[in-house]
Structures are given as C-alpha cells and as structure tokens.
Image: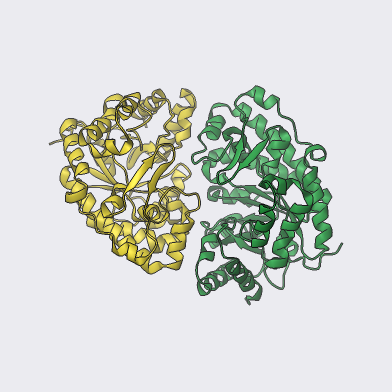
Chain colours: A yellow, B green
Amino acid sequence: MKLQNDLLLRAAQGENVERTPVWLMRQAGRILPEYRAIRNSISGFKELVETPELACEVTIQPVDILEVDAAIIFSDILVIPEAMGLPYQLIEKQGPYFENTVKTLSDVEQLRIADPEESLKYVTDAIRLTKNELNGRVPLIGFAGAPWTIFSYMIEGQGTKTFAKAKKMLYTNPELSHRLLGMITESTIAYLKAQVAAGVDLIQLFDSWAGVLSREQYLEFALPYISKICDAVDTVPKTVFAKGAYYVRKELGMLNCQAIGLDWNMDIEESRALIGQNMTLQGNLDPCLLYSDKSTIKAATKKMLNTFGATKHIANLGHGLYPDTNPDHVKYFIETVKEHKF
Amino acid sequence: MKLQNDLLLRAAQGENVERTPVWLMRQAGRILPEYRAIRNSISGFKELVETPELACEVTIQPVDILEVDAAIIFSDILVIPEAMGLPYQLIEKQGPYFENTVKTLSDVEQLRIADPEESLKYVTDAIRLTKNELNGRVPLIGFAGAPWTIFSYMIEGQGTKTFAKAKKMLYTNPELSHRLLGMITESTIAYLKAQVAAGVDLIQLFDSWAGVLSREQYLEFALPYISKICDAVDTVPKTVFAKGAYYVRKELGMLNCQAIGLDWNMDIEESRALIGQNMTLQGNLDPCLLYSDKSTIKAATKKMLNTFGATKHIANLGHGLYPDTNPDHVKYFIETVKEHKF
C-alpha cells in the first residue's frame, strides 16, 4: 500500500523533503491520558505488549492525537531475552526484573536463538494489525534493543547505575560475552526480519546503555554486533540510536544504516562532522525542554532545525519523552517543526 | 609541616616527578573490611561523617592499607545543602533522601549561606585531626560538590535517572536557579576556604551529574559557578572532575585550576588536545577493570600511564571505586602505577 506521508522514509534515505518529518521516542505511552485509560483497564504493561489489539491501539494514538509523521510499534526491547529463555516482569515504579540471569557459560547454553514465529508472534500480529489500521497514513517503525543493551539486562537482571556486573562479565569472561552477544544478535536479526515481513517501514536499534562503555569496549563488544544486524536486515532503512556513545560517532557514521540518532548532549555540528555528510541524523531536543514555556520550546526547536538543516534530518527528542510531559507542549513542538521555514 | 611525599602536589602543579602519584576516588569506604568494621559498629553513615575521630580513622585507612599517595577527607558532598538548611538522610541501599526540597523562590529565601564555623565544624575538626595523625606522610585532599550537582539534589531530593525536576527548574525558572546556584557557590567557597584553613593540601570539586546537561545549559548554569569557586579558592591546587562533561572539555581547560579529572569514557589523547598542554590530567581507568584478572589490570594500567605520559598526570580511576571490588586488585593497580617505568 502506498504511503500518504512518506516524509520519514525519504528523509532517512537522504532525499529532499518538503518539510522535516517529526516523531518522538516514547510518543506512545504515559504522556497520553488515552493511553493511561487503556493501561488502567488491564492488569499490567506486559498484557498491553502481548495483546495485538491493544498494542495496535496505543501505537496509533499518537498519530491521531499528536499528528506525528510516523508510528512506532508499541512493544519492549526485553521481549528478546524472554524469547531466548529469560522471562522478565515489569515491576510497577521499579522497572524490569529478571528472576534468572546469565552467570555462567552453562546458563548461556540453556538459552535458545529466538524464533519469532514461535515466541514473538504477538509482535508481528500487532504490526500487521497496525499497518492495516494505519491504512497508509504514516510509516510504521519497528525496533529492537542493540545487543550490548540486551546483554546488560540479561546479566544484571534489573536496572543498575554502574552496570558493574555486565561490565565485569566483559572484562572477566570475554568468551561467554561474545557467545551471548552472538546469540542475541542472531535472535535480533530473526526478530527484525519478521518485523519487516509483517510490514514495518523502517527499523530502529536502541543502544540505551552505550554510554557506560569505554571506547575500546564499545568497539569490541557493541559495534560489531550492531554492524552485523545492519548488514543482515537490508530491505528497509535503519536508524541506530546509541545513547551516550559520543566517543564512537565516527565509527557509527560508517555503519550500513541510513540514520544515526543523536542524544541531547551531542553537539549537532560536531556530530555531523564526525558522522559524515551521507548519513541522516535524528534528534535531538532535550526532553526536559518540553517542561518549559511555549516560547522557549519554539526558539529551541527552530534553532535545532536550522542547525540540522533542511535535509537529512528527522526531528525527534534526544531521549524518550518523560511521562510527566504536558501533551500540549509535545503538540507545540510537533507543530513548530511542521511550520518551520528554512 | 613538610610533606614526606608531595608527588600529588608536584604533579598537580605540573612539576617533574620521579613517578606518577596515585590515589582512588572512594578509596576510603566499603571496599576495605577495616572500614566496614567501623561502619558496622555505629548507627549510620552520617555518624561516621559527623564524628571527627571516626572520619579521621577511615580517611587514613587507605594510606596504611593501600599505600596511596594521598588521603581524601572522609565526608559527603551533601553536607552543604544541610548546612544551608536542607537536612538529608542516607537510607541504606537507597542513597540520600531530603525530606524538604526547593520548589519555589520562597524556599530559596528560607535557606542560608553555609557558615562552616557554625555548621561544618565536624569537617574542619576531622581535617585538623587527620593532618595531625598523617604527620606529613601524604597530602590531604579536601572536596566539595560542584554547584550544579548540589543544586540537583536540593531540587530532586533523592537520586534520579532523568534529573527531570532539576532540569525543568533550569528551563522554567532560571531566576530561581541562578539565585540558588549563587548561594550554593558562596557556601562552597566559604566551606573550601575553611577546609584550606584547617590544613587540606589540594581540593577537588566533584560535578557528578555534569553528564545530564546539554552544552548550552552547562555553560550557563554549571561552569560559571565552578569558575567562581576556582577563582576564590586560590591558595592550594584544585582539581575539577566533571563526570560526563566531555562536551565542554575545551572550556574546562580554561578554568583557574591545576588539574582536570577524566572519566573512563574520555579518550586520553583527545582530552589532552582539547584541554590543552598546561593542565594536569587525573584518571581514568574504568573501575570495572579492577574486576578482571591481574594481567589484564596490569596491561590496561601501563597502557593508560604511557598514554598520559610521565608528567602532568595523577593516576586514578575514571569514577569512584565500586564497593564490591577486591582490595587485592586495588593494591595491584596501585603497585603497577608505582613500579611503572616510562
């Protein structure tokens, strides 16, 4: 089906666009009262992720309400560890929790490569349903966690400030680490291919914990696996968002993908120079800026747009939306992008 | 009293040294069984901070046990908000907690500039006692939190992942923010001058949450206050450690201080080029590296030393020691630095 609004895909491919496309990380979720109404009617977050009709509904909400230029399938990066054999729970106000974690090579050997047909069908079903419901209005983004980020959850079992266990594993057991990272990578490739087969128009890899590694570790344990995924999934445009990985921007620019996400710490011009002229850049307004008044939001958004320029840019935040953001301010940000004249 | 080992001070001043001095952030604390024995004999962390005899004892422990080239007074950066009128508690396994936080300008008006004589005497007493007990063996480092980091605790009231409240305050109420940052700065200057009068040989400013600000915010709300402190406290060498502030390294290099701390993300050569040739650099081994085996620790430490070079370097970690680090590995890191030949 032909898309009525393909700004995102054209910007990702580096083509000229009438205006800069805009969507927001975490656009589907707690900021919308319509989302909270659905969330409060069911038992938990995982029920939402695992029920295609509900996932579809909350995926489309921001398209209707915020009028963004793309939908992103409502899901969680932790479906991959679960499909590999490590189930997770989401504990209210605390975050993810894994009862079992990976400690030894035999723990790794008991895991499997995720089979999307078997254990992630609720995601591909949600994608099919959403594509159908969207009816070509805007592109649908699929996503997965990057292998290092998934690895760190599988080792730590929960949120952490220091990532001491996961980094200790990299230093003390590189063999186990590479083995597990390889399995996550294979699982992710199968998962993303299934997402593409189900209809997503672009995929994004989230390396949420990139910022805790040293450059050396990132080059050994993170980037090669991202690169493998980019090479394997080659039928749709890809965006890589490695939060905090300022120290490998040059290398990110050499990936076989179309766009690189910038966090709000990353200077736009410096990043462009490091990443190179060929890549589309995505980002990078500080999500906290949406707490300020409209004139401040407008000025900062226009400044950001002018710095990125009229092409090869997808407007977004430099991190996911914070749940207590006023939806009116989010709308105002989106309108400002849409009305901007270069 | 003349110091028997003044390597730290000479390296900070850029003078030639026989070997690179070494100490570790969080060297006094939970990694040492001798510390835990004292900690378990009393009611809480704050009793340790507020009892000069005990603070002195745990300050000197790493000099005796680890043979580091400097002691750092055992204390907490949150003594400043408390001395300004916002008391804190340390909740076991959770971290700091402030019952009252700053929300409005009238909250700020109810605070006072800290008077070290009146409310921080336990710190200066601990410094005098420690200087006496050290008897010139190694220099004693004093410290304080940088204003932005202290500000964020006073607004958030506890640890946070996003610093949404503190950053929201910067965006929505710059007037209140500058007012409070100014009061923290004045308090910190008075506090550090009192530390110097009590005998510390060098001071370090910790901007632990530098990494959550954008460059623009850092230049408006963080750096000018650090600069003011550096200018005001001018009788001992100063080290500024702004964790995650990779995006203002050039500006950090222009501060009126002697040394800049690097975190483990920061590439050494790139940082030297940005910060300039005049400044001494401190750091920056990944604390997680101490989880690995000794040969890995040795190779990484020697590589780090050679990259920094034989002068204008103070060996340290790129972050505080993690509490579950094996003290033998810490000793091995220290020995490796001491035995290294350039």
**The N terminus of chain A: image quadrant:** top left
Q: Residue furthest left?
A: A1
Q: Which of B328 and A31 is in front in this view?
A: B328
Q: In this view, does A317 lie to the left or right of A130?
A: right
Residue occupying the point 32% across, 36% down: A45
Task: State how many labels appear.
Answer: 0
Q: Find residue A257 and report its horizontal and vertical position in percent.
A: 29, 52
Residue B11 in view in this figure? no
Q: In this view, does B279 lie above or below B171?
A: below
Residue A301 in view in this figure? yes
**The C terminus of chain A: image quadrant:** top left
Q: Find residue A341 and report its horizontal and vertical position in percent.
A: 36, 29
Q: Residue furthest front?
A: B41
Q: In this view, does A318 lie above or below B200?
A: above
Q: Find residue A307 and report its horizontal and vertical position in percent.
A: 43, 39
Q: Find residue B258 and report its horizontal and vertical position in percent.
A: 70, 55
Q: In this view, does A128 lie to the left or right of B49?
A: left
Q: Which of A314 and A227 is in front in this view?
A: A227
Residue occupying the point 67% across, 29% down: B179
Q: Is residue B71 left or right of residue B335?
A: right
Quadrant of the image occupied by residue B308: bottom right
Q: Residue furthest right?
A: B1
Quadrant of the image occupied by residue A253: bottom left
Quadrant of the image occupied by residue A173: bottom left
Q: Which of B15 and B261 is in front in this view?
A: B261
Q: Nearer the viewer, residue A183 or A11?
A: A183
Q: Is residue B37 left or right of residue A120?
A: right
